[in-house]
Image (cartoon, grey):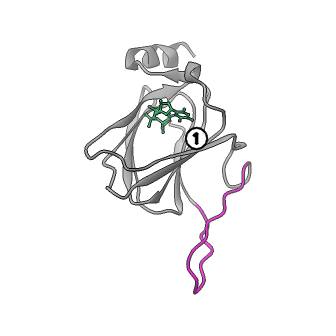
Amino acid sequence: MQAVKYIFQSHGDRRGQLVAIEENKDIPFRIKRVYYMYDTTAGVVRGCHAHKTLQQILICIHGSCKIRLDDGKDRKVISLEKPCEGLYISSTIWREMYDFSPDAVLMVLASELYDEADYIRDYNEFINFVRNS
Ligand code: T46
């Protein structure tokens, strides 16, 4: 499965911590879009889709959450609990984000601009897409 947890270098000194992320260096793509979610409703599950081409890095810059991943063959769950952790998700991986702490801020670095046509929102359609690609 092309989903990998990264640990970004944290530049710490007596003032605190700083993480820098450079495109094509710390992550494997150019960043075309940044978005983030916060004030997530308790118990909610977000995502529940895959992307045809989009690659992303998910970083829980405050609080914590879990991400359930499914590439059509294998499944795994990744927890994001620190601002220096990032989850790389390639295209064609079904993702579900859940178990958000009340203070969670989940920031996403994306390889493409927003395009609804890139989403696969039906799980059976996702399985067929994976089998045929
Ligand atoms: C993903 C996971 C991790 C925009 O207008 N522009 C954007 O760039 C995005 C991402 C969303 N929107 C609008 C579309 C919807 O009306 O914001 C609303 C919520 O989006 P969505 O329901 O797709 O949010 P999630 O949390 O289910 O999924 C998002 C991303 O859409 C998706 O690419 O991989 O986070």
Task: Based on the picture, tell me whether residue 6 belongs to the magenta stretch.
Answer: no
Amino acid type for the residue under numbered disc 1? Gln
Residue at screen point 60% across, 25% down: 115
- Along the line of sight, which residue is nearer the eye, 42 or 96? 42
In magenta segment, residue 10: yes
> 126 or 111, which lies in front?
111
Residue 12 in percent (x, y) is at 59, 78
For the C terminus, which image quadrant? top right
Q: Position of residue 110 (x, y in %)?
A: 62, 40
Q: Is residue 42 left or right of residue 26?
A: left
Q: Which residue is mark 1?
A: 56
Highlighted magenta segment, given as a residue range: 8-23
Residue located 53% across and 63% down the image: 84
Judge the density around disc 1: few (<14), some (14-19), many (≥20) Cα neighbours within 10 Å. Answer: many
Q: Position of residue 77 (x, y in %)?
A: 37, 44
Q: Residue 28: x, y in percent? A: 68, 45
Q: Is residue 22 above or below residue 16?
A: above
User: Magenta-highlighted stretch: main secondary structure?
Assistant: loop
- Whether residue 64 is situated above or below residue 40 in the rendered picture: below
Q: Quadrant of residue 102?
A: bottom left
Q: Give the structural element (helix, strand or loop) at label 1.
A: strand
